[in-house]
Image (spheres, grey):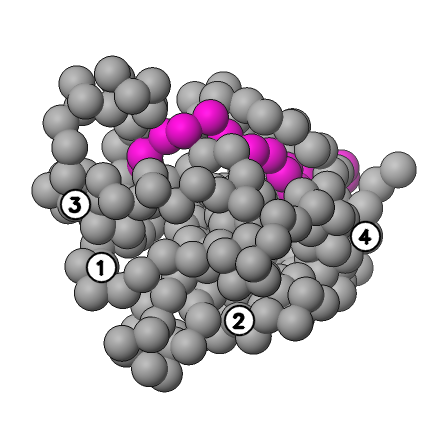
Amino acid sequence: MDNKKVNFQNLGRIRYKEAWDLQEELFQSVVDAKIHNSLTRPLYLLFCEHEPVYTLGKSGNRQNLLIAEQVCKSKNIDYYPIDRGGDITFHGPGQLVAYPIIDMEEFRVGVKSYVHKLEDVVIHTLQSYGIAGEKDEKAMGVWIDAQYPARARKICAIGVRTSRFVTMHGLALNVNTDLTYFNYINPCGFTDRAVTSMQKELGREVDFHEVSDRMKEAFAVVFGMEFAE
């Protein structure tokens, strides 16, 4: 019988490295339980906001960070090359980050369908605010006006790492994010597409906790997750 019971934790505002270390610890615990065919196999879903940070995926191009690392430090922006897929992106206050640490086999999905389900979670969340999020088959993440290159703008970045079908890293939805931070990078390697946020699309600040609650519900709907009490 599939195990879809997930331990949910909202970490609040947290520095990237602290959350990354926690992810690695939980990720290894899930992998170990799977290797040893443990009767209890914990799965996790972490939500958080980060202090300002740029992260560069393992296949990313360092030149997509448009300022020197010393300038990052002077602006109190952390910088980490990391082990997820994708290129460079920004995390910071006002952005909802979700890290599922789950066994894809328990949810009967492969890597490609897993990423599509993450996109569906965001699209489902945005729909409740009247925002039409879309997929782009050529670019991971969730977009607005994806079919119109001149107007296409990214509202959510996605980057994952998997081992033995266990996942880590995840998605980052711009809710009330300060978008000026994206001026210092080529987001996800793109030089010809803009970045947006829920706040920008709606013309008002959005209740962050409400978005978190709706996204948690969307994970339950899209993945069939059950949250442990």
Q: Name the residue under label 1.
A: 190
Marks 1 and 3, Cα distance to the nearest angstrom?
Answer: 9 Å
Q: Residues within 10 Å of mark 1 (few under 14, many from 20)?
A: few
The first of marks 1 and 4 along the sequence is 1
For image coordinates 26% across by 32% down, the residue present is: 81
Residue 40, percent across and down?
76, 37
Q: In this view, does 115 lie above or below 96?
A: below
Residue 92, percent across and down?
46, 34
Q: What's the magenta region?
A: 39-55
Tags 2 and 1 touching, CB below 8 Å:
no
Q: How crowded is mark 4: few (under 14 residues within 10 Å), some or many (20 or more)?
A: some
Q: Residue furthest right?
A: 229
Q: Is residue 99 left or right of residue 159?
A: right
Q: Name the residue under label 4.
A: 226
Q: Name the residue under label 3.
A: 64
Please name which of the two marks, 2 or 4, marks the residue nearer to the observer: 2
Q: Name the residue under label 2.
A: 133
